[in-house]
Each structure stands twice: as structure tokens, then as C-alpha cells.
Image: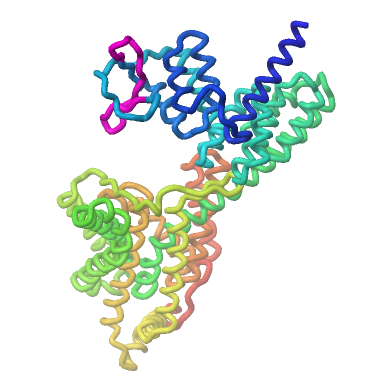
Amino acid sequence: MKLLYHNITRLLLLFLLAGTLGLHAQTPSGGNTRQLITEAILSSGDEQKKKISELINADDVALTSTILTKWRKSEVYIATDAGDKKVPYTLEEDKPIRIDNGQPLTLPQGSAVETDGALRKAIASTLNLLGIADPDPKVRQGAVAKLGGQQKAEYVPLFKARLEKETNAQVKYTLKEAIAITELADASPEIQTEALKTLGSLYSKRSGDLLKKFAGDPSVPERQAAAKSSLVKLENYLSFCETIETMFRGVNYGSVLLISALGLAITFGLMGVINMAHGELIVVGAYSVYVMEGWFTRAFGDAGLQWYFIAAIPFAFVNAALVGLLLERSVIRFLYNRPLESLLATWGVSLVLQQSFRYIFGPNNVPINSPSWLIGNFTILDISFAYNRIFVVCFAALIILLTWLLLTKTPLGLLIRAVMQNREMASCVGVRTAQVNMLTFAFGSGLAGLAGAFLAQLGNVGPNLGQAYIIDCFMTVVVGGVGNIIGTVCSAISIGVATQTLEQVLQNSVLGKITVLITIILFLQIRPGGLFPTKGRGLED
């Protein structure tokens, strides 16, 4: 009889809970929302905890959640009227508002309601239950995940009832997962077996440890087989997701290399000048973004932070192009066809520029705030894609397209290709090679500035930022084929993917980079001209 009474009581409690959270919404007999909360606050001991749990019956979920959250933080207060009647209230915009009727408090303010660990735990449990019916899908998903992890059988009817009404795909997934995880605590091996199969079909990462636990338990062969099968599915799924994520990181890293090396590919391929100051031109673009952010923030406040990067992109290109133009007119034009001298001279220029950055902006890295539309990520198949990295990949593709159009569809592009093929012959037919060199070097420097603008969105900016990319830039250009844009694209993406893959396989970033470097050295022994060697009479000599 005692067991029967216990089961009946438990069943009634489940129906009571299932009638809450908007699943079977009815007006509670205990009064409206504010009255229920008031009664809970003014109660004490076990009666108070019971009334807190009954707050899931309240009509106004949002109001209940707000007041309970304040109560948990000890932000609920008690005032006393002339007749010793206690009146609970909260502060809203520093104004005392009564909880029982929502009106301003006219009594003298009192002290905060004391809360202990047990009371806060009871409040947190009720908040989680209320969270299942929250209008925000993310809140619902978080509440379901937290309750599912507790593996309490009394929550299963709530999850199933909510699942019938849920419209959000991610919350539906979490509800199914929570039901299966909770059912693993059931005493019936049949229910556990079905739950294990469900978790396998869901590819549930949260259940990995539970699957391993049951896979190692031979007491029930069917249950163990289901656990092993689901564990294999999960491991294959995680391996697939890891592969895709590694490929994405590789493409992203390759896009950064591509943007950084594209300008060098043009100037190096056209002029044969080893520009060791290319990294500092990248830094010019990065600091241009920093300056533009400061201007927009001072002029427009927080609104300027959302749009400054749109203006910073052309600003970075122009600044780096002007610095490149000055470098070409003052140093580079005297060193054509003298690679050793150009290497030493541009190395000296890079040191001067680094010290200039330290003098103007300081020796420490400066943080740059990204616009809100570049912050965050979205998830597909448990793979996270950051918005800023997606933006870098897309813009790299756009830059390649514009560069290709410039070189193949414009008069300037025709002159650049002519000089690249044979400088002397182009000069003989009237091409002003000095002007072409100047404009090309400025354009390549501008591309380096764009690289700096995008790197500024991926990390902090400092005087030595360019030094981290200069070697990789030269490596990318040489492997792709000097002066070949398509080769540079293929080289950058290949190096990026190979680097990230080897780092993942070897579990060591340094070993991964060393392996890539050794592979490139061996590759250049076989194909000194790179993937797509540029052919022309001038280059054959």
C-alpha cells in the first residue's frame, strides 16, 4: 500500500508538472502569479521550498523568472507596514516595486530576504523548469540540456510533452537527447537499449562517456551491442566533423596566406625584387584599421564601431599603396635586377618601419574591436564557423577575382604582363616600364595593406606582425610559381590545408610547420619553378 501510495503521488505530481510551462496552461487555484510568488517569499522551511516548486504553475513565466532570479541574487526585500504585515518588493530602476501587486512601495524600505544554499538550489531548479517554456530557443535548449544531465525520471513526461509542441530544430534535438540520456538511468535493460540506439542515431556528443560505460558492461549482451554500435557511429561522426573543421581551418589559413602573398607575387614576379619590407606593408594596413576605428568611434560613438571596417578597407589599401610607391621611388627603382642589394636594402627599410611603428603607436600590441556582424559563429553538424573567418575567405576570393580582371581585362594589366614576359622588348615598343613598375609595386603594396586589414580582425596588431608572415609569403609565392596568380592561389590553399592537417595529426604545431617546410624544400628540388612556372623569353635567360 505504501508503494502504491507513493506511485500515485508521484503520478499526480508528474501530471501537475506537465500542466505547466505552457504545455497545459491553466489558471492555478492559488491565485495569480504575483500572489504565488509573494506566498513563496513569505513562507519558510520545507513549505517555502514546496511553494517555490509550485511556481512553475504561474501564468506569467517571464515575470516569475525575473523575480526568482532576483531572489536568488538576494535582490528581494521585505518591508513592514503599521500592522506588522510583511510586504516583499524589488528594486526596478532604483525604485521599490511591490511584488504582490506591481505598484510602487509607499512603506519605508526594509532589508533583503536571506537565502541559503538549499534555497538557492530550489530556486535554480524551478528556473530550469521554467526555462523549458522560455520564448528564447537558446534558453529553452540550455534548460533542457541541464535538466537532461540530471537524469531524473520525473522530467521525461515534461520533455515529451514539450517535444510535441517544439518548433525549433535544435531544441527538438536537445529534447530527444535529454529523453534518451534520462532513460539510461531506468532500471529496464530494454528501455536502456532503445535509449542507446537513439543516442547513436542522434550522434550525441554529450553521451560519449555514457556510451563507453555501457559498451564495457557485458551483463546485458543486447544493451552492450547497442552501446558499441552507437559508440562507433559517434566516433565516425566526430572524425568526420574533425576532418571538415580541419579543412576549414586550412582554407582559412590559406586565405590569410593568399591575401598576404598576392601582392608579393605580383611585385616579385614582375620585377624580380626581393622585398623584405613586404611584412611591414601588411602592418601599415593593420594600423590603418586601428586609426580608422579610433576616428569613427570618436565621431559616431558605438554606432561608428559597426561601420568603420567598411571604410578601413580602402583606407588600408591606399595607405599601403602610398608607402609602397614611396619605397619604389626612393629605393627599389635603383635596384632592379640586383636581388642581393634589394634584399639588404628592403631589410633595412623593414627595420626602419618597425621602429617607426613603435615610435608612433607604442611597442605593445593594440587591440582592435570587430564590428558586431563579424563577431560570433554559426554551427553546422557540430562544426563551428566563425563569421570573421568566413569573411576572410570570401574576401580573399573577391580580391583574386578583381586582381585577375585587372591583369587580363585592362590596358594596365596588358602592360604588366608584357613587361613580365620581356622587359627589354616591351621597352623597345614604347612601354614606359618605369611607370609600369611604379604602379605595379604600389598595387602589390596595396594588396599587402588589405591583408593587414583582415589580419587585424583575427588578432591584435603590433609592430612585429608582418615578421610572422614574411617567410610564409615568400614560400607561398615560390611554390606556386613566381608571378603566377593561379599558382599562388593553389600554393596558399595547399600549404594552409597541409599545415593544419599535419598539426592535427602530429598534435604539435611546430612539428607540423617543420614537416611542411621539409616537404616544400623537397618539392622545389623536383620542380624549381613551382607548381606553375612562368614561361617567357625574359625568364629563360
Residue 407 as seen in the image, left or right of residue 168: left
The residue that appears at 54% across and 59% down in the rendered structure is 523
The residue most toward the left is 359
104 magenta-colored: no
User: Can residue 96 be seen in the rendering of this structure?
Assistant: yes
- Give the side of residue 238 with respect to residue 108, left or right: right
Query: Residue visible at 42% across and 30% down?
Result: 66
- Which residue is farthest bottom? 429
Can you give x and y, in whole percent of width and height, for residue 251 in the image?
A: 51, 56
For the point 19% across and 53% down, the residue is 298
> Does 456 sit left or right of 136 as displayed?
left
Residue 518 visible in rendering: no
Judging depth in this view, the residue of 84 and 197 nearest the camera is: 84
- The quadrant of the picture occupied by the N terminus is top right
Q: Quadrant location of the C terminus?
A: bottom left
Residue 445 position (above or below residue 182): below
Secondary structure character of the magenta stretch overall: strand
Q: Is residue 82 magenta?
A: yes
